[in-house]
Amino acid sequence: MLRFEELILDNNSPIYLQILRFVKQGIASGTVCRGDELPSRRTLSALLGVNPNTVQKAFRLLEEEGILESRTGAKSVICTDEAAAARICAELRESDARLAVQMLRESGLTKEGALALIDRFWDGSPERSNG
Amino acid sequence: MLRFEELILDNNSPIYLQILRFVKQGIASGTVCRGDELPSRRTLSALLGVNPNTVQKAFRLLEEEGILESRTGAKSVICTDEAAAARICAELRESDARLAVQMLRESGLTKEGALALIDRFWDGSPERSNG
DNA sequence: CTAACTGTATTATAACAGTAATACAGTTTT
DNA sequence: AAAACTGTATTACTGTTATAATACAGTTAG
């Protein structure tokens, strides 16, 4: 099951998107699968200390993406099979890669320069090749 | 001189940040240097088709970073020497790399996975390793 | 059935970012 | 000095995000 108590919210992006991503990552990693129930909007909002409508927004988007099934009165249920989970996993990473590539391209880097920069920054501060 | 007429604005990020980056890239590439005048807020806003205050916001930030010198009534002047230009150049790319790395790490990728993804995405759509 | 839960919908408020319109103040040019 | 330019400051409008209160509707457990 998803451990929402381990979801630490930050202020850099909308809360509903952080919840969305958390659920998607849970699916991508196999932590949750088809048939698993999610906590109710009210329960989760209390747990996270946010407004129920903020959770509702995230859940609504999950439903629109076909990840969640909601019936009025009943708890919401994950409805992704393994293929869908793999797709979500790929989407998560591809969207990140797309954003990263776009960002690096816009700064005028070549592909090789970008790869070198990523390589240097991954493990910590880069060597200063130039002041 | 900076050729603002070649600055194509997009809707993915705030205009004032796009202007800011354009000027910084001009400095980093040596297109402008210390002593060069920038077009007035009004002139540039008319050229770009945006509000003068949007340009003003970018220029104010440039001044706060010590890149621009403004006196009421007179045109704003670039005040970065070569060392500052080199620093800006490095900052531009390092900040991009930091953001890219952070983004890719958060999606759970390894360094090798991230490099491979960047490599695949740089020239266009990646091969689908999995459906 | 009833009570307590569930999801859904509506409306309102506040804060913030981005953009815009306008007025004010100083410089430059004539 | 006057006109035309310049930067600066104030205020306002818009959209997004987050929150909140409330009402309604369906399910589940007793």
Image: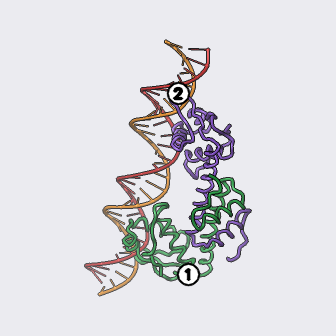
Chain colours: A purple, B green, C orange, D red
Q: Is residue A104 above or below residue A23?
A: below
Q: Is residue C15 above or below residue C27?
A: above
Q: In the rendering, at what x and y percent does residue D9 appear?
A: 42, 63
Q: Quadrant of residue B109?
A: bottom right
Name the residue: 55% across, 28% down: A74
Name the residue: 70% across, 59% down: B113
Q: In which quarter of the image is residue B54?
A: bottom left
Instruction: Tell which of A14 and B123 is nearer to you.
Output: B123
Q: In the rendering, at what x and y percent does residue B89 appear?
A: 60, 74
Q: Amino acid under label 1?
A: Gly
Please tell me whether mark 2 sits on a helix, a strand or a loop.
loop
Please tell me whether mark 1 sits on a helix, a strand or a loop.
loop
- Position of residue B105 in the picture relative to residue A108 (left or right): right
Q: In the rendering, at what x and y percent does residue A65 appear?
A: 53, 44
The image quadrant where one finds the C terminus of chain A is bottom right
Q: Amino acid under label 2?
A: Gly
Instruction: Tell which of A93 and A41 is nearer to you.
Output: A93
Q: Quadrant of residue A123?
A: bottom right
Name the residue: 60% across, 52% down: A91
Mark 2 chain:
A
Instruction: Tell which of B111 and B56 is nearer to you.
Output: B111
Labels 2, 1: front one: 2
Give the crowd class for mark 2: few <14, some 14-19, many >=20 residues within 10 Å.
Answer: few
- What numbered label is drawn on residue A73? 2
Mark 1 chain:
B
According to the picture, the residue beneath numbered tag 1 turns out to be B30
